[in-house]
Image (cartoon, rainbow, N blue to C red):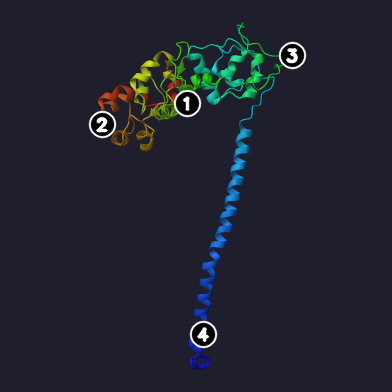
Amino acid sequence: MWKDWLALSKREQKGFVVLSIILITLIGFYFLTPLIFSSQQKRGEVYSAFLNWTDSVNAINSTEITLNSDTLFFFNPNEVTISKLQKLGVNGDALINWLKYRESGSSFQTPEDILKIYLLDSALTVKLMPYVKFNTDGVQKVRHDKLPVAENRTNSELSIDSNSLNYIRNTKAKPEESFVIEINSADTAEFTVLKGIGSVLSSRIVSYRSALGGFFDVEQLKEVYGMSANTVDENRTSLSVDSLAITKINVNRASLRRLKKHPYIDFYLAKAIIEYRKEKGSIKSVEEILLFKEVKPELKNKLAVYLTIEDKKQNKK
């Protein structure tokens, strides 16, 4: 063997040594890699678990109820408005379930009846029950030195009947005529109170409203993707529209990108407006645009509502 080694040239000997080192390195890497990645994976799992725990703690802290004597006041649970419920700390799904409970035809007879509201925080419920007052015409502010004290109640007394919860959760009742939503200012939570409208559809309504610049007619709700004509008709008595809240597009200033973002303006119409404006210098009236061949006949009257040739400040003058 040694004779064979000595028979090799120095260059061949160096090449043999280098190849041996490479081979040993590859073998070591092959056997050590699983151990290295295994330990890193374990560290990653521990770190991920720690992050999940941190997120859960933050979520709990973010949902804590912080009520003080300034936010508590006497209220009639059968008549209290959405804004007042929010001031009392009733938000999100609990607020929606409160409204659904009333709209289903049910009414609160005793302070303990608010226990039937699904997803209403139990600590908040205990704080609110002393403030429930059925025989009051207005809101009575609570004095700092005379706060009602909630009676001591056991867990069994604070338990909620499961049948009542299932009824409230599954019932999608017809809104009362006295409950009216202004569709240009309502948020997604208010829309979900309506019959046949869930969280997904309510988000689409708000998004479409933003793209339009506001609604001028309740009928426009039928243009929202997924909204049936029957749903709009069934809720019509609970809907109102403030057409003064509409944001108009100044055709003498709007860019091509801004114009084609509007649901009633496609790329071809937007381009025609830009080219006409360049040719004429400025557009004198909205009627000039409505005569374009690119304007769809069925959208002509609707489009006129959203176009203007002046800035908002100039309109006020």
Horizontal side of 246 relative to 51 (left or right) equals left
Residue ID at (53%, 73%): 25
Q: Which residue carries the number 3 mark?
A: 146
Label 1 secondary element: helix
Q: Earlier in the sequence, mark 4 or mark 1?
A: 4
Residue 71 appears in the picture as rendered:
no
Which of 299/35 is in front?
A: 35
Looking at the rendered image, the disc whose residue lies closer to the viewer, 3 or 4, is: 4
Residue at 43 percent across and 22 percent down: it is 315
Question: Is residue 308 or residue 99 the one in the foreground?
Answer: 99
Give the amino acid type for the residue marked by disc 2 in the picture. Glu
Q: Report the mark closest to the observer, 2 or 4.
A: 4
The amino acid type, in three-letter code, at marker 3 is Lys
Dot 1 amino acid type: Thr
The answer to the question of whether label 2 and label 3 lie on touching residues, with beta carbons closer than 8 A, is: no
Marks 3/4: CA–CA distance: 96 Å
Q: Establish if 179 lies above or below 2.
A: above
